[in-house]
Image (cartoon, rainbow, N blue to C red):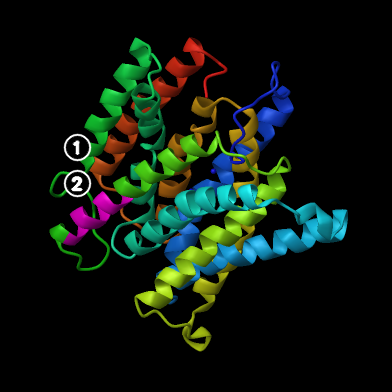
């Protein structure tokens, strides 16, 4: 799983229904497939190098497309905007993609997506911490969501991949919680940054910064590229994720700049449904009873949060 990805300023009337729902539905579907793509990619590719490269390549391709269509000057940004895109790109893309790629070697993609469904809950808590009032629906949704995640993480609650120990499952599940928390924080924080007015230009720089940071992290811990050893399945996952980086993150960047944050955050509770179903159908990932229960509980709580926030103030940031 972005605003410049966030400008704090939005038009009074907001975007039209089509310009709101078209990118939002795109985000729901595209990002729902990324957990499956990442699971396939890391089967034979080093997780951090692969995760970082797919974002970096996506950024380069998008930059080329923009330069061809609008001329190279469209990519010009000032020093402040360059720093802002680095902050948002590394914070949102870098931390999230690194932890997801590592976690998916130990827990199923559907479960990782389910834990990622807590992103809206953390966003609401950030709003509370910043002094904003929240209604009873939002408060109840946060409580339900936290209970659901807690129940899912109890011993035996997550079906392992291979011979993973309970300790490893717990550790990497906790890593996904950290990824969700940082994703929420940097998405929320980035709405106040001075980012390029063109959301696609913002997307380019965030993809480049985030991808580069993860590649460097992979090299530091000793990962090395070996393309001759990568399977066709991993290559397919990689190139699908490059496409998803451009389309999905471009949609996310636009939404964060133009649509209320609670509505944007709905991607987090739609994605797990797509991820669990695709993981079960295509990768034979297990769906335990506890995962199904956790999915229902977390999604119910998160949906309640979003509905509560929309009723409270459609223009909430």
Residue 35, by quadrant, is bottom left
User: Which residue sits at x=38%, y=13%?
Assistant: 133
Could you tell me which secondary element the residue under label 1 belongs to?
helix
Tell me the magenta residue range: 168-176
Q: Residue furthest front?
A: 79
In the image, residue 264 sits, relative to residue 11, either above or below, namely below
User: Which residue sits at x=49%, y=79%?
Assistant: 231
User: Which residue sits at x=32%, y=32%?
Assistant: 298
User: Which residue sits at x=47%, y=11%?
Assistant: 312
Of residues 316 and 16, the one drawn nearer to the viewer in this rendering:
316
Of residues 277 and 137, the one drawn nearer to the viewer in this rendering:
137
**Which residue carries the number 1 mark?**
151
Local packing at callout 2 (Cα closer than 10 Å; few below 14, some 14-19, many 20+) is many
Residue 257, by quadrant, is top right
Of residues 231 and 13, the one drawn nearer to the viewer in this rendering:
13
In the image, residue 317 sits, relative to residue 186, either above or below, namely above
**Which residue carries the number 2 mark?**
157
């Amino acid at each position: 799983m972005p605003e410049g990805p966030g400008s704090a300023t939005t038009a009074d009337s907001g975007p039209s229904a089509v310009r709101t729902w078209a990118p939002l539905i795109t985000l729901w579907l595209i990002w729902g497939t990324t957990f499956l793509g990442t699971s396939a990619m890391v089967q034979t590719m080093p997780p951090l190098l692969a995760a970082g490269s797919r974002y970096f390549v996506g950024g380069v391709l998008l930059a080329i497309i923009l330069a061809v269509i609008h001329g190279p000057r469209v990519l010009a940004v000032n020093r402040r905007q360059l720093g802002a895109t680095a902050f948002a790109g590394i914070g949102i893309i870098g931390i999230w993609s690194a932890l997801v790629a590592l976690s998916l070697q130990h827990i199923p993609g559907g479960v990782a997506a389910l834990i990622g469904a807590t992103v809206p809950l953390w966003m609401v808590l950030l709003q509370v911490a910043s002094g904003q009032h929240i209604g009873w629906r939002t408060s109840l949704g946060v409580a339900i969501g936290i209970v659901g995640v807690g129940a899912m993480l109890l011993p035996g609650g997550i079906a392992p991949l291979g011979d993973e120990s309970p300790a490893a499952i717990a550790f990497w599940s906790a890593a996904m919680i950290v990824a969700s928390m940082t994703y929420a924080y940097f998405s929320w924080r980035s709405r106040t940054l001075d980012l390029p007015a063109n959301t696609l230009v913002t997307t380019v720089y965030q993809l480049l910064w985030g991808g580069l940071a993860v590649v460097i992290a992979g090299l530091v811990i000793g990962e090395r590229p070996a393309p001759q050893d990568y399977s066709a399945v991993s290559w397919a996952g990689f190139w699908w994720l490059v496409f998803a980086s451009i389309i999905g993150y471009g949609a996310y960047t636009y939404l964060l700049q133009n649509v209320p944050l609670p509505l944007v955050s709905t991607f987090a509770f739609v994605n797990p449904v797509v991820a669990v179903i695709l993981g079960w159908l295509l990768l034979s990932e297990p769906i335990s009873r506890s995962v199904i229960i956790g999915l229902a509980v977390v999604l119910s709580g998160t949906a309640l949060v979003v509905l509560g926030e929309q009723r409270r103030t459609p223009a909430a940031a």
